[in-house]
C-alpha cells in the first residue's frame, strides 16, 4: 500500500488558467495536447489530479499566484526599455498593479471552487474538515486542498488580509522573486516594507499561516519578530548543500523547528544539487538520494524527523526534465519513501515526512471549525 502524501506546494490553478492544462486530464494527455509547442516547459508537465490520486497524493496546498510590480515601477512599453535589475518580470505571472493581481487570484479561486463542485477536490478550511478528509480518504476521493497565496501581491492593503481569509485562503508568503509591496524576495536581501510590517500583523490577527518561503533573510528575521504563531516554509531546501538565498540556513531551519513548523522539500534539480561545469544537472545526474541528503541534514540538525515534509513545486515553471531521474510524474512521489527506507529511515519517520508532519501542522494551525 502506497503511503498517503501531502504536497505543500502545487500551482494547480496557475497551470490550468495560464497554460490551458485541464487538471482533470491525465498527464500524458496534457503533454500530448502541447506536443506541437516548443516554448518553456510545454509537453513536459508532471502534475494532474488523476496522477495525484495514483500516487496517493491525498492532500496539497494549492496556490493563488499573481504578482504585481511594486509602486513606482511599470512594465516596459518598448523592447529597448528595461526594468531595474531589482525587479524580476515574467509575462505569464506579472501584472501592472495589485488590482489586476487581485482579479487574477480571484479567478484562480473560482477555478478551485469549480473543481470542488465537480467532485475533483475538497477545499479544506478547518481542523474538523481536515480530520474528516483524512478519515474518509480512498483512492477515488477528491484531493484535499488548502489554499495558499504565493506572494501577497493580490492583497491590496493590509486590512484586506481578513477578506482573503474569509474567502478561504489559509496560508500566504510575502514575496516571490525580487521586491514586492510587502517584502524583499528571492534574489536579494532586504527588509519588510512598512506595508509588509502591517500585513504580517494583520495575518497574525486573522489566523493566516505565515509561509516564509521566497522571503529574504532580513525580512525573515523581521517577520519572525512580528508573527506570534507557528510558521512554515512550503518549498525550500538546505543552503549548506546548495548555495543561494532561495535555500534555508541552518539557523532558519532551527527557527522553524522551534515553532513546531514544517519545511517542504522542493524537487527542482537546481535546488537539490549544485550546478557545476562537470555536472550540468541533466535529469540523469540528480536522484532522490540527493533529495534524501537535504532531508537527513534537517533531521540531524534538529534532532528528529518532525519538521520536514514535501513541497515538491512540480510544474512550478519547470518540467519533467528538471526533476530527479526516478520521477516521471507526481504519481511517482512514493518512490521518495522507498529511498528514505533504503537510507535507514524508520517507517514511523517516513510516514511523518510523506504526510504526517504537514497533517499535524495543519491540524494544529487551521481554525478549529
Image (cartoon, rainbow, N blue to C red):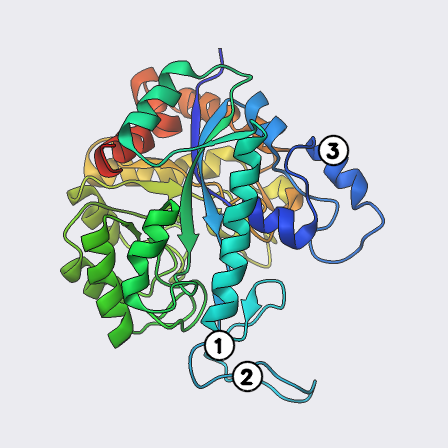
Helix, strand or loop at disc 1?
loop
Let me know if residue 359 appears in the view: yes
Distance from the alpha carbon under mark 2 to that under mark 1: 7 Å
Closer to the camera, 24 or 261?
24
Q: Position of residue 89 (x, y in %)?
A: 56, 72
Q: Tell me the tag on residue 190.
A: none
Let me know if residue 345 appears in the view: no
Quarter-of-image position of residue 265: top left
Q: Tell me the tag on residue 83.
A: 2
- The image shows residue 275, relative to residue 287, as above or below, that is below
Q: Earlier in the sequence, mark 3 or mark 1?
A: 3
Q: Is residue 230 left or right of residue 212?
A: left
Which residue occupies 70% across, 44% down?
A: 44
Neighbour tally class for label 2: few under 14, some 14-19, many 20 plus, Cα within 10 Å:
few
Distance from the alpha carbon under mark 3 to that under mark 1: 35 Å
Q: Position of residue 136 (x, y in %)?
A: 41, 15
For the residues labelled 3 and 1, say whether their Cβ atoms are less than 8 Å apart: no
Neighbour tally class for label 3: few under 14, some 14-19, many 20 plus, Cα within 10 Å:
some
Closer to the camera, 55 or 341?
55
Q: Tell me the tag on residue 28.
A: 3
For the residues labelled 2 and 1, say whether their Cβ atoms are less than 8 Å apart: yes
Helix, strand or loop at disc 2?
loop
Which residue occupies 35% across, 70% down?
A: 184
Q: How many marks?
A: 3
What residue is pinned by disc 1? Answer: 87
Amino acid at each position: 500500500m502506497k503511503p498517503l502524501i501531502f504536497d505543500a506546494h502545487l500551482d494547480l490553478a496557475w497551470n490550468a488558467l495560464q497554460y490551458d492544462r485541464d487538471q482533470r486530464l491525465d498527464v500524458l494527455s496534457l503533454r500530448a495536447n502541447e506536443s506541437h509547442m516548443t516554448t518553456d516547459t510545454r509537453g513536459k508537465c508532471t502534475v494532474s489530479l488523476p496522477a495525484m490520486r495514483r500516487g496517493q497524493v491525498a492532500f496539497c496546498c494549492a496556490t493563488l499566484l499573481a504578482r504585481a510590480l511594486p509602486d513606482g515601477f511599470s512594465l516596459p512599453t518598448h523592447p529597448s526599455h528595461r526594468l531595474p535589475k531589482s525587479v524580476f518580470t515574467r509575462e505569464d505571472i506579472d501584472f501592472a498593479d495589485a488590482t489586476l493581481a487581485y482579479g487574477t487570484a480571484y479567478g484562480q479561486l473560482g477555478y478551485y471552487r469549480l473543481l470542488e463542485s465537480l467532485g475533483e477536490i475538497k477545499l479544506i478550511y478547518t481542523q474538523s474538515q481536515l480530520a474528516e478528509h483524512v478519515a474518509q480518504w480512498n483512492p477515488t476521493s477528491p484531493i484535499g486542498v488548502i489554499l495558499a497565496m504565493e506572494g501577497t501581491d493580490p492583497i491590496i492593503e493590509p486590512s484586506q488580509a481578513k477578506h482573503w481569509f474569509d474567502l478561504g485562503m489559509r496560508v500566504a508568503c510575502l514575496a516571490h522573486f525580487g521586491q514586492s509591496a510587502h517584502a524583499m524576495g528571492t534574489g536579494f536581501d532586504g527588509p519588510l516594507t512598512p506595508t509588509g510590517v502591517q500585513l504580517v500583523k494583520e495575518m497574525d490577527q486573522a489566523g493566516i499561516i505565515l509561509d516564509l518561503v521566497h522571503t529574504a533573510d532580513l525580512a525573515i528575521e523581521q517577520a519572525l519578530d512580528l508573527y506570534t504563531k507557528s510558521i512554515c516554509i512550503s518549498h525550500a531546501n538546505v543552503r549548506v548543500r546548495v548555495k543561494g538565498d532561495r535555500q534555508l540556513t541552518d539557523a532558519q531551519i532551527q527557527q522553524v523547528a522551534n515553532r513546531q513548523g514544517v519545511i517542504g522539500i522542493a524537487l527542482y534539480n537546481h535546488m537539490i544539487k549544485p550546478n557545476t561545469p562537470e555536472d550540468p544537472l541533466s535529469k540523469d545526474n540528480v536522484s532522490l538520494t540527493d533529495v534524501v541528503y537535504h532531508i537527513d541534514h534537517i533531521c540531524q540538525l534538529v534532532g528528529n524527523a518532525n519538521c520536514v515534509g514535501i513541497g515538491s513545486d512540480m510544474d512550478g515553471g519547470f518540467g519533467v526534465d528538471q526533476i530527479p531521474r526516478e520521477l516521471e510524474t507526481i504519481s511517482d512521489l512514493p518512490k521518495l519513501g522507498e529511498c528514505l527506507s533504503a537510507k535507514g529511515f524508520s517507517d514511523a519517520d517516513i510516514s511523518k515526512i510523506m504526510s504526517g508532519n504537514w497533517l499535524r501542522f495543519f491540524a494544529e494551525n487551521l481554525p478549529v471549525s
